[in-house]
Image (cartoon, rainbow, N blue to C red):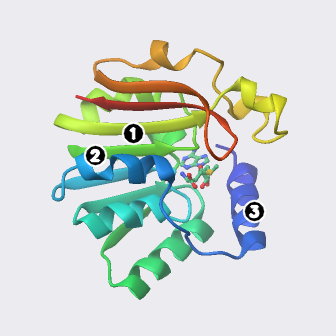
Amino acid sequence: MAEADRERWNQRYRERGEGPGAPSDFLRAWEDRLPRAGRALDVAGGLGQDALGLARRGLDVTLVDVSDVALEAAAAAARAQGLALTCLPRDVEAVGPPPGPFDVVVCLNYLWRPLFAALPGVLAPGGWFLFAQPTRKNLTRHAHPSARFLLEDGELPGLVQGLRVVELTEGWTGAGRHEARLVARR
Ligand SMILES: C[S@@+](CC[C@H](N)C(=O)[O-])C[C@H]1O[C@@H](n2cnc3c(N)ncnc32)[C@H](O)[C@@H]1O
């Protein structure tokens, strides 16, 4: 990633001036099936709302992101809530995900296709992977995210490698986004 892209994300988070909100509906829908102990990784987790949700469950969570502004906000929220959270500045597109094994990996609203090939290597046996990303059809209702950040419609099944699919859906969500969502296990 170019330094300009990192600064673009930092700028976006500075302008929003927010801390993390509630974990995503998708994570909340599945969290009762996820383990309450072990290691979790949130890839490009931004302000950390999902990472904090996993930490609240008892998981030992690492949040990686290129934006140090987002990571600082996530770390401050973790301190305020009395939760342990490891915040790691990391350009995953340059150096890949951190070494596992992780019992849970989440990647929400961030698309870097080579992550799918790396997952069997970082997930523990039986480990869970949760992924959600809008697809091209989302453009029929929303200008953002722009096309370069979107999955093609119907693309997600072909990206999954070395994992057992528990559930894969694609369609309009209650929040009005056209998303592909995957829950898979190693
Ligand atoms: C749309 S936000 C999603 C954040 C969070 N997962 C969520 O659902 O709110 C995309 C995130 O990807 C991060 N990002 C972009 N490129 C990255 C890279 N190469 N490595 C790690 N994080 C990256 C950005 O800083 C940003 O926080």
The numbered disc on residue 3 is: none
- Residue 106, compared with residue 112, is above or below; it is below
Coordinates of residue 120 in the picture (x, y in percent)? 27, 28
Give the camera-side residue of 10 and 49: 49
Residue at x-position 72% and y-position 50%: 5
Q: If the image is split into quadrants, where does the N terminus sit?
A: top right
Q: Examine the image and state in which quarter residue 6 appears.
A: bottom right
Q: Residue 51: give x, y in percent of width and height.
A: 40, 61
Dot 2 corresponds to which residue? 104
Query: In the image, what residue type sits under mark 2?
Result: Val
Q: Is residue 14 left or right of residue 127?
A: right
Q: Is there a contact, CB below 8 Å, between mark 1 and mark 2?
A: yes
Question: In this rendering, does residue 75 appear at all?
Answer: yes
The residue that mark 3 highlights is 12
Residue on which disc 1 sits: 130
> Would you call the spot at circle 3 few (<14 residues within 10 Å), some (14-19), or many (20 or more)?
some
* Real-space CA distance between mark 2 and mark 3, rounded to the nearest whole angstrom: 28 Å
Q: In this view, does 123 lie to the left or right of 112?
A: left
Upstream in sequence: badge 2 or badge 3: 3
